[in-house]
Image (cartoon, rainbow, N blue to C red):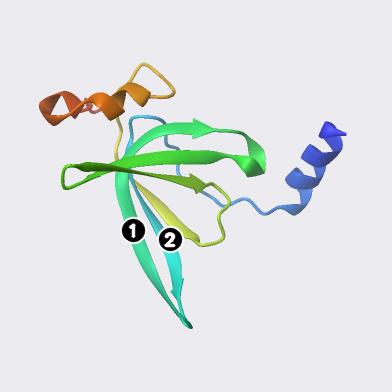
Amino acid sequence: MESLVKFVQDEFVTRKELPEFAAGDTITVYYEIKEGNKTRTQFFRGVVIQRRGSGTSETFTIRKMSGSIGVERIFPVNLPALQKIEVNKRGKVRRARIYYFRGLTGKKARIKERRH
């Protein structure tokens, strides 16, 4: 049964072409917001804390600081309102899920940039 669901998802659900990004990267996500009968584009720039799931149900979590308050947002990869993703900076981290980043403040909350 699981293989049947996976087959249907692979065949019929359109996947968006997104750039490669991983935990520790700083990205900007542009997404559409509907307000009444108008739509506008808003962006959310922050550090990727995790990528979770696979296939059509994959999600990623971004964390940014708004003043002195940390704000996290979870985006599904196949969100129809998602317009584009820009990778601003590649981060060098040793883990796939950097939950410890939530407890860091100030200079300790910096992530080294990965050179390639």
On the image, the x and y values in percent for residue 79 come to: 55, 55
**Res. 53 image quadrant:** top right
SS type, badge 1: strand
Q: CA distance from mark 2 to mark 1?
A: 6 Å
* Residue at 82% in and 33% down: 2
In the displayed structure image, the side of residue 103 where residue 80 appears, left or right: right
Quick one: 63 or 13, which is closer to the camera?
A: 63
Q: Is residue 35 visible?
A: yes
Q: In front: 86, or 104?
A: 104
In this figure, which residue is indicated by the disc labeled 2?
Answer: 31
CB within 8 Å, label 2 to label 1? yes
What amino acid is labelled 2 in the image? Tyr
To which quarter of the image does residue 116 belong?
A: top left
- Disc 1 crowd, CA 10 A, few/some/many (<14, 14-19, 20+): some
What residue sits 88% from the left and 34% below the top?
1
Residue 100 placed where, x, y %?
A: 32, 22
Whole-percent x, y for residue 74 in the image: 46, 44
What residue sits right under mark 1 in the picture? Answer: 43
Tell which residue pokes out farthest to the bottom in this image. 37
Q: Mark 1 is on which residue type?
A: Phe
